[in-house]
């Protein structure tokens, strides 16, 4: 059995347990994977169970598509007032201008969603 199949089996079993509202443990992962007829090494279930212990799997699922820079920009703008009061509005205006330029550059390519 390939490593990717093993990982997929453990991940799907963890998702099933999360969906049922059950705690993700190595024993439960192993029993689900065995019921599916897949043989894995025991270390994988233990590894995933320890990695997910105390974590909110639902938060992982909803944060997959989030981007890092969009979160970092407000943090930088919040830090600017502490450093120098008037610098924050100027930084915010520059940020808005950058966003507008990026949107315009998409239109300049000459094709769109419905063209």
Image (cartoon, rainbow, N blue to C red):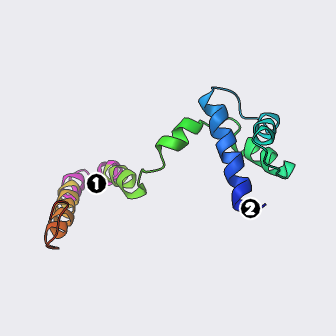
Element marked by disc 1: loop
x then y, percent, for residue 34: 81, 41
Between the residue at mark 1 and the residue at mark 2, the CA separation in whole angstroms equals 53 Å
Q: Residue at x 63, y 27 (%)?
A: 20
Q: Residue at x 47, y 41 (%)?
A: 62
Tell me the quarter of the image containing the N terminus. Answer: bottom right
Work out whether 28 lies above or below 33.
above
Q: Which residue is mark 2?
A: 3
Question: How many numbered marks are there?
Answer: 2
| Residue 93, quarter of picture | bottom left
| Residue 24, quarter of picture | top right
Sort mark 2 into few (<14), some (14-19) or many (20+) by Cα contacts within 10 Å: few
Q: Which mark is residue 17?
A: none
x then y, percent, for residue 2: 75, 63
Q: Residue at x 76, y 42 (%)?
A: 33
Q: Residue at x 42, y 50 (%)?
A: 66
Left or right of residue 81, residue 4 in this image:
right
Q: Which residue is mark 1?
A: 84
Tell me the quarter of the image containing the C terminus. Answer: bottom left
Left or right of residue 10, residue 15 in this image:
left
* Magenta residue check for 85: yes
Front one among 72 and 84: 72
Left or right of residue 5, residue 87 in this image:
left
Q: Residue furthest bottom?
A: 109
Upstream in sequence: badge 1 or badge 2: 2
Q: Nearer the viewer, mark 1 or mark 2?
A: 2
Front one among 26 and 76: 26
x then y, percent, for residue 57: 59, 38
Element marked by disc 2: helix
Instruction: Specify the segment rendered in magenta.
Output: 78-91
């Amino acid at each position: 059995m390939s490593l990717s199949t093993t990982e997929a089996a453990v991940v799907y079993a963890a998702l099933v347990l999360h969906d049922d509202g059950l705690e993700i443990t190595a024993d439960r992962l192993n029993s689900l994977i065995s019921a599916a007829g897949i043989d894995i090494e025991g270390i994988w279930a233990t590894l995933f169970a320890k990695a997910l212990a105390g974590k909110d799997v639902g938060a992982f699922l909803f944060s997959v598509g989030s981007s890092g820079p969009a979160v970092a920009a407000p943090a930088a703008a919040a830090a600017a007032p502490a450093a120098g009061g008037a610098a924050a509005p100027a930084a915010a205006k520059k940020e808005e201008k950058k966003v507008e330029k990026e949107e315009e550059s998409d239109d300049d390519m000459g094709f769109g969603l419905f063209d």
